[in-house]
Image (cartoon, helix red, strand yellow):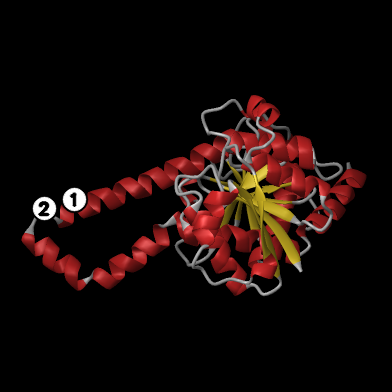
């Protein structure tokens, strides 16, 4: 049995989306057990009328909610009865609980996971690794994407190793093609950090390092994993998502600008529906926090039920693939090679 905790508050559509996503996941995974944290009355109200296995779902009352506008360290210190902190403390204290999922405050989750759940021995910093779709029908992971602004060469190496294992365990990519985010593909390009990281990544055992990657190739399908500091990785993802969304807005505007365009769009409606599904982040789950002693998944704040379900699936597959244990072994191996 895989037991996970779901923070049911803090998102734009909480707790309705969280509860509905949890029910979906329970139906799909018969060996999954969930603990829902948050206001029990509100959660029970959302559960009313839904068909689910009550033996595999429990509710842990937590009357407080950490807002995204609160200072993370202050919030986790003051709001110990929040849905997020009750989830974190349960993961920390209960050996039968394998991990957690939250769509709440990113800063609070990172701080709480790092300080309370703890890092795998030898991991310098946990790293976020979301995935995006590529043009050839695959996915690409970006590690790190916002957890660490200032990094070292060894941290980049660990980000690469942890994400490499994640793509293998959860997505079945046997030899992920890993690239270092840079301003050019040549080995000598970039600042001192990236110049120093290149040969280290190239020499890392078990890592299929294929060189530098320019940001324009993120969705090309040429790479399975992009290695970056948290600042650059976050800018890369948000600028890519923003450009795609603006292009969709322009396309919609142009379609409605002329009758002939509307007719053409009607005839191509199935294709447009497929493109919309391709671009919808709700279909790709959340951003996993790699390097913690237990599984941690951060979903988008505006996640709906389908996205919550995918986040739970990510956490489930991470535990089923023994990702934490494999990461600990790989990080220990890296330490012996330094």
Residue at horizontal 56 percent and vertical 66 percent from the top: 23
Residue 199 position (above or below residue 34): above
Q: Quadrant of the C terminus?
A: top right
Residue 323 position (above or below residue 81): below
Residue 321 position (above or below residue 141): below
Q: How far separated are the C-alphas under marks 2 and 1?
A: 6 Å
Q: Position of residue 200 (x, y in %)?
A: 76, 43
- Is 93 on the left-hand or right-hand side of 236? right
Disc 1 element:
helix
Residue at horizontal 82 percent and vertical 45 percent from the top: 120
The one of 105 and 22 positioned closer to us in this rendering: 22
Q: Which residue is mark 1?
A: 253
Q: Position of residue 156 (x, y in %)?
A: 71, 40
Q: Callout 1: 10 Å neighbours few (<14), some, many (20+)?
A: few
Q: Which residue is mark 2?
A: 257
Q: Position of residue 174 (x, y in %)?
A: 69, 67
Disc 2 element:
loop
Residue 277 position (above or below residue 230): below
Looking at the image, can residue 125 be seen? no
Residue at horizontal 72 percent and vertical 54 percent from the top: 99
Q: Quadrant of residue 31?
A: bottom right
Q: Quadrant of residue 151?
A: top right
Label at residue 2: none
Mark 2 and mark 1 residues within 8 Å of each other at the beta carbon: yes
Residue at horizontal 45 percent and vertical 62 percent from the top: 135
Q: Quadrant of the N terminus?
A: bottom right
Looking at the image, can residue 206 be seen? yes
- Total numbered badges shown on the rendered structure: 2
Q: Position of residue 55 (x, y in %)?
A: 69, 69
């Amino acid at each position: 049995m895989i037991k996970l905790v779901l923070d049911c508050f803090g998102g734009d559509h909480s707790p309705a989306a969280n509860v509905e996503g949890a029910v979906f996941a329970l139906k799909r995974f018969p060996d999954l057990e969930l603990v829902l944290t948050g206001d029990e009355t509100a959660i029970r109200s959302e559960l009313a009328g839904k068909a689910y296995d009550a033996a595999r779902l429990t509710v842990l009352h937590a009357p407080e909610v950490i807002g995204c506008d609160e200072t993370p360290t202050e919030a986790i210190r003051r709001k110990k009865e929040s849905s997020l902190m009750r989830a974190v403390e349960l993961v920390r204290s209960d050996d039968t609980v394998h991990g957690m999922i939250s769509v709440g405050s990113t800063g609070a989750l990172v701080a709480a996971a790092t300080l309370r759940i703890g890092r795998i021995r030898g991991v310098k910093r946990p790293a976020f690794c979301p995935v995006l779709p590529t043009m050839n029908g695959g996915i690409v992971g970006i590690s790190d994407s916002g957890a660490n602004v200032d990094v070292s060469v060894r941290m980049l190496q660990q980000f690469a190793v942890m994400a490499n294992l994640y793509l293998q365990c959860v997505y079945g990519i046997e030899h992920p093609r890993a690239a270092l985010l840079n301003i050019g593909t040549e080995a000598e390009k970039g600042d001192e950090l990236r110049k120093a990281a290149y040969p280290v990544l190239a020499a890392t055992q078990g890592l299929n390092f294929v060189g530098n990657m320019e940001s324009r190739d993120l969705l090309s399908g040429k790479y399975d994993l992009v290695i970056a500091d948290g600042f650059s990785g976050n800018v890369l993802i948000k600028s890519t998502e923003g450009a795609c969304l603006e292009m969709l807005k322009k396309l919609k505007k142009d379609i409605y600008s002329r009758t002939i365009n509307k007719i053409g769009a009607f005839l191509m409606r199935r294709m447009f529906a497929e493109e919309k599904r391709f671009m919808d982040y709700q279909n790709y789950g959340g951003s996993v926090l790699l390097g913690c002693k237990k599984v941690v998944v951060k979903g988008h704040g505006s996640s709906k039920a389908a996205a919550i379900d995918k986040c739970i699936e990510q956490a489930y597959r991470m535990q089923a693939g023994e990702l934490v244990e494999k990461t600990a072994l790989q990080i220990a191996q890296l330490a012996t090679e330094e």
